Amino acid sequence: MLIAIHQPQYLPWLGYLDKIDKTDVFVILDNVQFKKNEWQNRNRIKTAQGCQWITVPVLYRFPEKINEVRINNKENWGRKHLQAFITNYSKAPCYDNYISFFEDIFSRNWERLVDINVEIIKFLITTLNLKTRLVMASDLELREGSTERLIDICKTLGGQKYLAGKDGNKYMNLELFDEEGIEVIFQDFKHPEYNQLFGNFEPYMSAVDLLFNCGDNSLEILRGN
């Protein structure tokens, strides 16, 4: 069994979905320290003026874990994010197929950041027809060390192989994996190109860019076919 583990991203990019697609079980690492203004509460979409960041405002106090972080609903961020989608994707070929989901998402009163992130991740998995099982790390009993935590997840779920990010060897103790008989594989994701609005292709956007532009062909494109 191949397992991948990653923090819950907001509107994740294609490399995140590639990890999910390649594994049997994908563990959402929601019980580690939150990192403000990384990918956990923001991402990018493509506009006529170039890339645009869209950010969920949070009420964060160090050293809160991801699943403890609250959203700052004093800001009307949901309306802004929906308007960004309408402005920049309403002319995309497959816009009508998916916008109702985001209209619902952005109209709801979310309290915790992790909840909206997971809801969007589940939507992307379902929409792309991925078969991967999702597990929340906070539902498991784990040690605190960074490598030990990953090993415990793999052992608890019966994973013999672990799919790490391409730079995983910078923070993992690979000898500990070897001692536990867990094979570490490093992700080698090659970003596909596809038809976008607004001129030349721009990689590393949120996966919604692919969905709105390519619809039912999105999984085939994600897989590089």
Image (tube, rainbow, N blue to C red):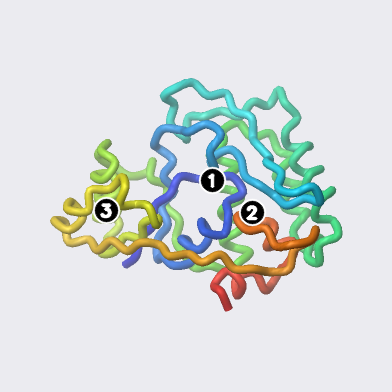
Instruction: For mark 2, give the secondary structure.
Output: loop
Q: Which residue is mark 1?
A: 9
| Residue 99 image-quadrant placement | bottom right
Label 2 to label 1, Cα distance in Å?
13 Å
Q: Which residue is mark 3?
A: 156
Residue depicted at 38% across the width and 41% down the height: 138
Apparent side of residue 130 relative to residue 24 in the rendered image (left or right) = right
**Residue at 68% over, 26% down:** 73
What is the x, y in percent for residue 193?
A: 64, 68
Name which residue type carries label 1: Gln
Identify which residue is drawn at 79% across, 47% down. Answer: 49
Left or right: where 141 falls relative to 41: left
Q: Residues within 10 Å of mark 1 (few under 14, many from 20)?
A: many
Quadrant of image for the N terminus: bottom left
Residue 70 lies, in percent from the top left, at 56, 28
How far is disc 2 from disc 3 in space, using C-alphas?
Answer: 34 Å
C-alpha separation, residue under disc 3 versus residue under disc 1: 23 Å
Measured from the top left, where is residue 161 in percent x and y? 29, 64
Circle 3 packing at 10 Å, graded few (<14), some (14-19), many (20+), is few
Mark 3 vs mark 1: which is more N-terminal? 1
Q: Amino acid at mark 2?
A: Met
Amino acid under disc 3 = Thr
Which is nearer the N-term, disc 2 or disc 3?
3
Q: Quadrant of residue 116?
A: top right
Q: Residue furthest bottom?
A: 225
To which residue does mark 2 refer?
205
SS of the residue under disc 1: loop
